[in-house]
Amino acid sequence: MPVSLVVTADTHWPRRARDLPHSLWVAIDDADLVVHAGDWVDVALLDRLEERSRRLLAVHGNNDHGALRERLPEIARAEVEGLRIAVVHETGDATGRERRCAARFPDTDVLFFGHSHIPWDTTTATGLRLLNPGSPTDRRRQPHGTFLTAVADAGVLTGVTLHPVPR
């Protein structure tokens, strides 16, 4: 049975925004699985996502401390509809990312990551798909904030869509 995903990272709440964008909350409410690739900043957002998500797969980031580090791992893994998923916050510089991640995550089909606030979608020579949803609240050098939605079905990730968030 297909599983709908919403993927976000680098929310930096409440430093960068008073709340998550409405469109992201709607996507969270509709998703079967919510993935957060770190840099929450405040544990209250983790509590809210746990309350509203059917299922949450999440990690801590470099800006997360205290209770966030106690409650969240550095790397999270799950098998969803035959798709082997891993989540991590940092993957290092863009140069050589595919090679490094393929070596670090050899038994993974899709790796979700954050840290850069820059959307990313590539596939390594080994078939590992690397996806960064950007940030819905801190666009940095991007024209707008972003998050991803996708569907896991029979070992394949389909319908990967980058959603812009209005300023």
Image (cartoon, rainbow, N blue to C red):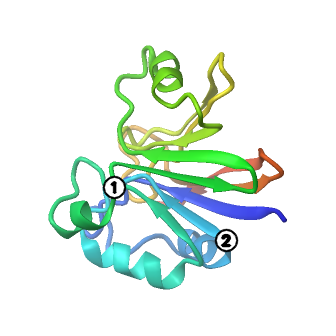
For the N terminus, the image quarter is bottom right
In the rendered image, residue 163, in percent from the top left (x then y), is placed at: 62, 54
In the rendered image, residue 110, in percent from the top left (x then y), is placed at: 62, 40
Q: Is 120 in front, or is 155?
A: 155
Residue underneath mark 1: 73
Is residue 15 shown to the viewer in this render? Answer: no
Q: Residue shown at 56%/28% (left/top)?
A: 106
Q: Is residue 101 left or right of residue 3?
A: left
Q: Is residue 84 left or right of residue 112?
A: right
In the rendered image, residue 57, in percent from the top left (x then y), is placed at: 50, 62
Whether 50 is drawn above or below 103: the answer is below
- Which amino acid type corresponds to the residue marked 2 in the rendered image? Asp
Is residue 90 shown to the viewer in this render? Answer: yes
Whether 124 is drawn above or below 155: the answer is above
Disc 1 versus disc 2: nearer the observer: 1
Residue underneath mark 2: 32
Q: Residue shown at 59%/33% (left/top)?
A: 107
Q: CA distance from mark 1 to mark 2?
A: 21 Å
Disc 1 on helix, strand or loop? loop
Whether 104 is drawn above or below 153: the answer is above
Q: Residue shown at 49%/50% (left/top)?
A: 144
